[in-house]
Image (cartoon, rainbow, N blue to C red):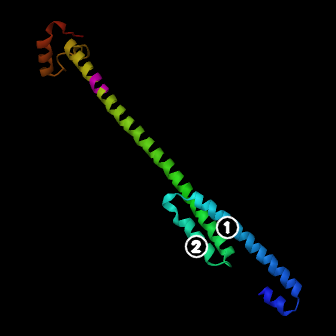
């Protein structure tokens, strides 16, 4: 390693300076990691406390593992952010699906109502045509079915129209 090679070259002051700098960097990273771990603890909900305790266990197991744990924390944080985004999107998708289901439900109800309205409308037209013998306006006795003629003539014989 760099420290060993500097020690062997008898350049004690340069070796000490490098060691101090590395120790300071590791200490700064550990402090930042402790703060980040606290943040992570605050971010995790009651059902997911294992994440922060997992990071803390590694953090306090090995004092030389500062950089590795920091990388691990970053990876966990990124994964958590992704999960949050996915969860948020899933909620949005669920809301949209529910909204769509409701809309389709309303459309089906409206369609059934429209269908019933049309059936009623055509039934009224048919009844009016039948009762008023308006069919005779568009047809004469020769090309109109006998049974309809008989029914109509029996019902409203005085309203018979011939072209």
Chain-order first, disc 1 or disc 2: 1
Task: Tell me the SS state at disc 1.
Answer: helix
- For label 2, the crowd category at 10 Å Cα-Cα, with few meaning under 14, some 14 to 19 and many 20 or more, is few
The structure residue drawn at horizontal position 78% and vertical position 74%, both measured from the top left corner, is 24
Write down the region rendered in magenta: 117-121
Q: Quadrant of residue 57?
A: bottom right
- Do tag 1 and tag 2 residues touch (Cβ < 8 Å)? no
Identify whether 46 is placed above or below 11. Answer: above
Q: How many marks?
A: 2
- Residue 38 pos. (x, y %): 63, 62
What label sits on residue 33 in the rendered view? 1
**Disc assigned to residue 152:** none
Quadrant position of the C terminus in the picture: top left
**Magenta stretch prevailing secondary structure:** helix
Assess whether residue 136 is covered by the magenta stretch: no
Residue marked by disc 2:
57
Give SS at disc 2. helix
- Residue 53 seen: yes
Query: In whole angstroms, how far apart are the C-alphas of marks 1 and 2?
Result: 12 Å
Point out the residue furthest to the top here. 158
């Amino acid at each position: 390693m760099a420290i060993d090679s500097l020690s062997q070259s008898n350049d004690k002051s340069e070796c000490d300076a490098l060691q101090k700098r590395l120790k300071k960097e590791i200490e700064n990273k550990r402090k930042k990691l402790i703060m980040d771990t606290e943040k992570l603890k605050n971010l995790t909900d009651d059902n997911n406390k294992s994440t922060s305790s997992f990071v803390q266990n590694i953090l306090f197991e090995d004092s030389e593992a500062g950089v590795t744990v920091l990388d691990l924390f970053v990876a966990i944080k990124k994964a958590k952010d992704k999960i949050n985004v996915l969860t948020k999107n899933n909620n949005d998708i669920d809301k949209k699906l529910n909204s769509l289901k409701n809309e389709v439900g309303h459309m089906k109800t409206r369609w059934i109502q429209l269908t019933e309205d049309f059936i009623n409308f055509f039934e009224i037209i048919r009844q009016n045509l039948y009762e008023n013998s308006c069919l005779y306006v568009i047809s004469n006795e020769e090309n109109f079915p006998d049974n309809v003629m008989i029914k109509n003539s029996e019902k409203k014989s005085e309203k018979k129209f011939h072209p």
